[in-house]
Amino acid sequence: MSTGNFENWAGTITDIGPMYPFVGTEMIWFLAGLAFWIWWHVVQAKRETRQYEEEIKRFGSPESLRKIIDKESPENP
Amino acid sequence: MDNELTALGIIFTEFYYWLTVVIMFLIHVGFCMYEVGASRHKNHMHTLMKNTMLIPLVTITFFFFGWWIYFAFPNGPGITGGVESAPWAEPWSELMGTHMGGAPATEAFTAEDTAGWARINGVFWASFLLFSWTAASIVSGSVIERIKSTGFWILAVGIGSVWWIIDAAWGWHSAGWMVQKLGYHDAYASGVIHAIAGGYALGILFVLGPRIGKFAPDGTPRNIHPRNPWLVAIGLFLIYTGFWGFYVACNVPMWDIQDGDGVFFSATNIYLAPTTLSAITMNFLMSLSGGLLMGYIVSRGDAFWTYSSGLAGVIAASAGNDLYHPIQAMFIAALGVIVMYKLHYIVERKFKIDDAVGAVAVHGYAGFFGVFIAGFFLWGYPSSPDASFATISPWGQFIGAVIMFGVLGFLPGWVTAKVLNSFGMLRIPKEIELAGLDVGAEAERYADEQAIIDAERAAIGSVGGSD
């Protein structure tokens, strides 16, 4: 029993083609991969939007921004 | 692989491309360092992650559809023919997986197909993939400190896995329609990678707009200097180093170039026309030198521009560096640097374009220039071993440069950026730009550090008690 197309390395090596397991299921893996890619973008986009909203609440007031920028100023090395 | 000589040829070719991938990886290390060095302290981590995450995104999408585009679209489609069949590059193909090269599992392939592609498909795919990363990374530097990661990563997939590989199918494929009809010649990708990425970046920059403070109220541009010039210098040196792998990956290492009777093996360029590694090694170094020398003069010794000019020099000579004389390569590089440096400041002032690392100039303008000037230097040369193809000409190269920079670069960049902008996915909020993209992470870090300091202060009491 093997999940691949061969069970040992004996015999004629040129008879061996694909070496990965579950040959014949490639389309399913491809579709799952596409879904994973799209899912990643969706999750990332939502998180980035939420992150900026929270950061604006915490640091977005004119006083906070002034403090942050003052720290960066060459006048305050 | 049933005799030593055949095995040597196949395994050498496999190893050759594998090695180019390892060397080209340094280009990306260099781009990351360069960008972080050019960004301000408050944006360092975001800048790093923006560039880093394009690696997996472009990799998986290049697997899903980029590789197939290269083999399927050399005819346009619709210009010299239809969509070509390319079963070995379909993401569900057995040849896109680990394969011994023996008996095919499906009827899509013959034993000859599998024997040839099993050992070359993966390394050849990876070589092209590293070009894809480069294209996306070129864009990444120009838009730092104000682009949303969401928008940038969609744009990165666009240039890395769609637009550049279409141009490669058209003008960097031995049967590409641009090679056939225009005599397009671009051996080391002045246009195919650099002009297109520069044009794409410019299209995005028009929509994205400049960073706050980049232009004075009267429109005069202000310099936002690299925050860490040492990191920039190391980054650019690493890009130079990785560029060796880039050049070598543009060649086929061993090919029978004898037309008709007999056999003669040589390295070839991507069009399967003869060249030698020796030739491109000399030309690479001479064009790098021409770029550095002229960059130092035109920028009056500015380190940032001098380093960038070394790169721009190589890019300006790359289209014809398989055939130029080394001294020609040096002068072409020097001329290309003057053009790209002057254009950078003209465009910056006229259109208020804030290209944070000069990527549009170094890659876009120098690449355009490189493609065009090859048409004069190599006028009448064969573009391909196929004698029915058009020969190299200034007008063929000019049209080619416009297609690379404008049609497949600027236009898709501008349109995609417009769409992303309309959904609020392109530019970060003004408050975040002012506070810095790392503001939240930095606040957490300070809080963590403070907690440790407080704990250590508390521990001082127990030290005294143990005496």
Image (spheres, coloured by chain):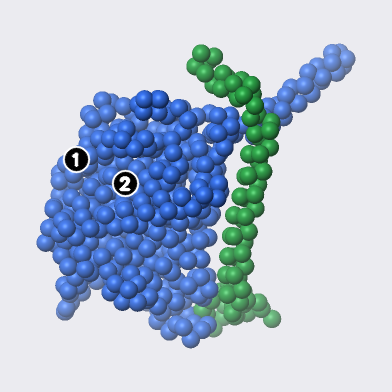
As drawn, the residue found furthest toward the left would be B380
Q: Nearer the viewer, residue B184 or B448?
A: B184
User: Looking at the image, do the residues carrying marks 2 and 1 touch, with CB atoms under 8 Å apart?
Assistant: no
- Determine the colour of chain A: green
Tell me the amino acid under the disc marked 1. Answer: Leu
Q: Position of residue B330 (x, y in %)?
A: 19, 42
Q: What's the chain of the residue with tag 1? A: B
Q: Which residue is mark 1?
A: B335
Residue in view at x 27 percent, y 54 percent: B402
Residue displayed at 38% across by 75% down:
B83
From the viewer's side, name the closer residue of A26 and B80: B80
Colour chosen for chain B: blue
Callout 1: SS: helix
- Residue B326 x, y percent position in the rendering: 17, 46
**In-front residue for pair B249/B191:** B191
* Residue positioned 50% across, 47% down in the render: B421
Task: Specify the label residue B158 is tagged with.
Answer: none
Residue A33 in sight = yes
Q: Secondary structure at mark 2?
A: helix
Quadrant location of the N terminus of chain A in the rendered image: bottom right
Q: CA distance from mark 2 to mark 1?
A: 15 Å
Find residue B222 and report its horizontal and vertical position in percent.
38, 26
Reading the image, the residue beneath label 2 is B364
In the rendered view, would you say B354 is above or below B101?
above
Number of dots carrying numbers = 2
Q: Is residue B350 left or right of residue B373?
A: right
Residue B328 falls left or right of residue B437: left
| Pair 2/1: label in front | 2
Three-letter code, disc 2: Gly
Q: Residue furthest right?
A: B465
Q: Is residue B382 visible?
A: no
